[in-house]
Each structure stands twice: as structure tokens, then as C-alpha cells.
Amino acid sequence: MELRAAQEQQNFACHIITLNPEAPATQEILRSLQQQGVEAGVFTAVDGRQGYPQLQPGEYLNQRMSMLRNRRYMTATEVGCYLSHLRAVRHSYEAGHQFVCLLEDDVVIEPDFGRVVRELTREPRDIVRLMALKLRRRKVVGEVLPGFSLTRPERGTLGTQAYLLSRAGMEKFLAHASDIHRAIDHVLDHFFLFDLETYAVEPHLVYERHSASTISKRAADAGRRPNLLESLLYHPLKMWFSGRRHLYFWRKRAELYPNQWPRELPGKSPRLRGKGRACEALLESPGGGQLAGE
């Protein structure tokens, strides 16, 4: 009930992005949220399964940049997933919401989701990732509620299954993301390009199901490969983006450092992973192994 009141007072919106609103998994998410006092609705995803979706004014599919950055074109399903998130954010922004929580339809809601999200809406932050698929070094910046930490990840945590945007975060996202050339999760992971102040919650408030979302981000190969000039430009462009990232690290050093790896697994998603000995030890530990593979 408390979050319902917060939704009225702070103009908070929560949407489940799905191609199948009547699917049992989608309905289960809606029930779980309602039980925790979160009024949520369904945002119908953009379907890219039968071909490239039609773009709306202000949306630009930049396949040239996709070839330079990814060495391939974006697939139709990637574009569909991308537009699903872009339009859901735009819908909430144009509706005047101060916060929007977006969930994909392949998640399970943890018991404390409602009360933690309610607490997160007390202070606007550009984006708070409510789950992640990749372990990263991060700085613990405070406690949201007893047992839940707010962190600043050094790098992208991968995945768009669940996140909370403030109005300022929506503005930054919409200004940057209308040029479409990377998968939507990569856009959020490259927060350093548009100064999207990124936070995360530990432990995660949702976890990913084994079954895939209806808004699949990947599909069959999208066509031609880079020509000689595009191949030659790939590494200089990659170095330029790397330079942007390290400049961001330097500018935000007081907010990002010192940081450290998590001491225990922050979530239950089967695909949770990470690189390096610290991550491998965490994932292979008795408790971690069970969570990573269940």
C-alpha cells in the first residue's frame, strides 16, 4: 500500500515490457508486484521477429555506425527490443512521470522489491539497475534499507531485465538513445558516453528465469560484413571510446573508487557471470555454485 501512495504522490510508473501480455509469466509478475503494493501495467513490446519495425519520428537506425562498432548490422529483433525500451521510456517521460521502473517479462520478483523500490524513489538518481548479469567491481555508497546496499559499478553490469530511471535519467537516455546502433543493454552499459549516473542494488531485486524473454535481443546474422575501410576504422574507433571511458573514470574517481568485488553473489540469475579469479571463486563457491546454476 505504501508504494501505491508513493506512485500517486511522486508520479511513479512501473511497466512490464512484453509481446504477450496474457502469458502466465507476465501475469505472475503482475500478481507479485500487486501483492507488494506496486501498481504495474503492461507496455506492449515492438515486434522485430518478422522484419525491421517501422521507425517513429525522432528514431534513427544508424546501421553504418553499427557496422563500425559491432562489425555487423543490427538484427531486426535487436531493433525491436531496443525500440521497446526506448518507447517505454519516452511514454513515461511524456506522461510526466518522475520515476519509471521497467521490467522485462522473463524475471521473478523478489519479496522485498516493493519496499526497496519505494525507498529508492525518495531520492532521484539517473538510473538504478535492479539486477545484473555480470559481476563488476563497484563502490558501496550506502544502505537503501537494512540488508540492501546501493553501489556504483565501475563498468556496465549487462542486462535490461529491470531498472529504475528518474526523470533526469529519462532525459539523458532519450537524448542519447534515439540514434540506434547498438543493442539496448550496451547503451546502458556505456553510461560514460552520456554521463548517465549509474547505481545498482545488492542483493538484486529480481532474477532472470531460465526461459527467454519474448523480446529477444539476438537473432540470426543480419547480413553483410565490414568492408576494408570499415575494418580499418574499427580499432581506432574502439580506442576512442576506451579513451572516453577512462576520462569518465578520472572525472568520477571520487564516486567510483575505491571499489571492490562483491563478497557474495548478489543475485540468482542463472546467467550471472564475471571474469577473473575473484569472480570464478565466487561463482564456484558452494552457495555461489548453487545460485549460478539453479
Image (cartoon, rainbow, N blue to C red):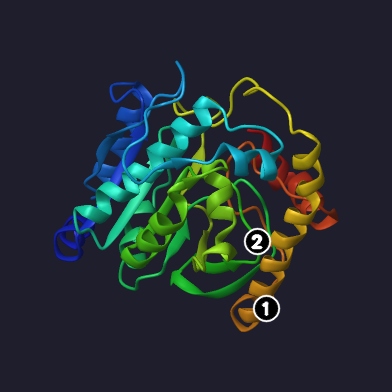
The residue where tag 2 is placed is: 155
Q: Position of residue 229 (x, y in %)?
A: 78, 41
Q: Position of residue 94 (x, y in %)?
A: 22, 53
Q: Amino acid at mark 2?
A: Arg
Residue 191 occupies quadrant: bottom right
Q: Amino acid at mark 1?
A: Tyr
Quarter of the image that includes the C terminus: top right
Quarter of the image that includes the N terminus: bottom left
Residue 193 vertical placement versus 252 (above, below): above
Q: Element at badge 2?
A: loop
Disc marking residue 179: none
Residue drawn 70% across the image and 79% down it: 258
The residue where tag 1 is placed is: 257
Foreground tag (1 vs 2): 2
- Judged left or right of residue 236, residue 10 is left
Q: In the current view of this chain or complex, which residue is farthest to the right?
A: 277
Q: In the current view of this chain or complex, which residue is farthest to the bottom?
A: 254
* Disc 2 residue crowd, few under 14, some 14–19, many 20+, Cα 10 Å: some
- Residue in the foreground of this view, choosing between 83 and 274: 83
* Disc 1 residue crowd, few under 14, some 14–19, many 20+, Cα 10 Å: some
Q: Position of residue 286 (x, y in %)?
A: 75, 45
Q: CA distance from mark 1 to mark 2?
A: 12 Å
Residue 159 visible in rendering: no
- Judged left or right of residue 151, residue 15 is left
Q: Position of residue 221 (x, y in %)?
A: 65, 22
Residue drawn 58% across the image and 33% down it: 74
- Residue in the foreground of this view, choosing between 78 and 200: 78
